Image (cartoon, rainbow, N blue to C red):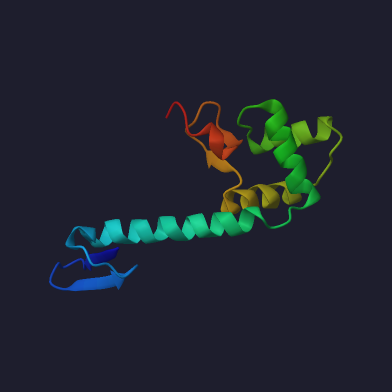
């Protein structure tokens, strides 16, 4: 597909050739923000696919196990308590760093407006905004 991107002033068109195409119906004109959102989504998907394959630390594995066992989102405080009660004791800063890394990789999501709020698996989605 060939995508044309209008810049913010809509005076010039920028072209990005994704694949060589013969048919005119494969041409799509999008705004700059739509184009950049699409590019960002593609990069995020590529990063997610690469990062999910990366090895996890023991703390990160323990976090994923606790979330799967609980079956709901957990706040940082609840996560620390759940890890401790399951015998998987890690320091607070280690857990916070691991949570942030798992969110960055796309392994977990975070939502402060969800009920319950906290960290969860991507398959759980965002509910009750």
Counting from the top left corner in percent of width and height, residue 58 is at 80, 49
Residue at the (77%, 41%) spot, across then down: 62
Place residue 24 in its image quadrant: bottom left
Q: Nearer the viewer, residue 96 or 25?
A: 25
Counting from the top left corner in percent of width and height, residue 54 is at 69, 58
The quadrant of the rendering that contains the N terminus is bottom left
Residue 102 showing in the rendered view: yes
Q: Which of 85 and 72 is in front in this view?
A: 72
Residue at the (58%, 35%) spot, across then down: 118
Place residue 77 in its image quadrant: top right
The quadrant of the rendering that contains the C terminus is top left
Indicate left or right for 128 with 55 as reference: left
Above or below 74: residue 90: below
Residue at the (66%, 47%) spot, across then down: 99
Above or below 46: residue 16: below
Counting from the top left corner in percent of width and height, residue 120 is at 60, 36
Residue at the (74%, 53%) spot, across then down: 56
Above or below 77: residue 48: below
């Amino acid at each position: 597909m060939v995508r044309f991107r209008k810049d913010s002033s809509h005076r010039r068109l920028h072209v990005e050739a994704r694949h060589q195409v013969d048919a005119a119906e494969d041409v799509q004109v999008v705004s700059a923000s739509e184009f950049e959102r699409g590019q960002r989504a593609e990069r995020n998907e590529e990063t997610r696919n690469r990062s999910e394959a990366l090895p996890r630390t023991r703390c990160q594995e323990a976090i994923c196990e606790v979330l799967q066992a609980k079956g709901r989102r957990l706040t940082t405080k609840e996560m620390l308590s759940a890890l401790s009660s399951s015998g998987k004791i890690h320091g607070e800063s280690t857990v916070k760093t691991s949570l942030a890394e798992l969110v960055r990789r796309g392994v977990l999501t975070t939502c402060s407006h969800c009920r319950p709020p906290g960290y969860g698996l991507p398959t759980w989605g965002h509910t009750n905004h």
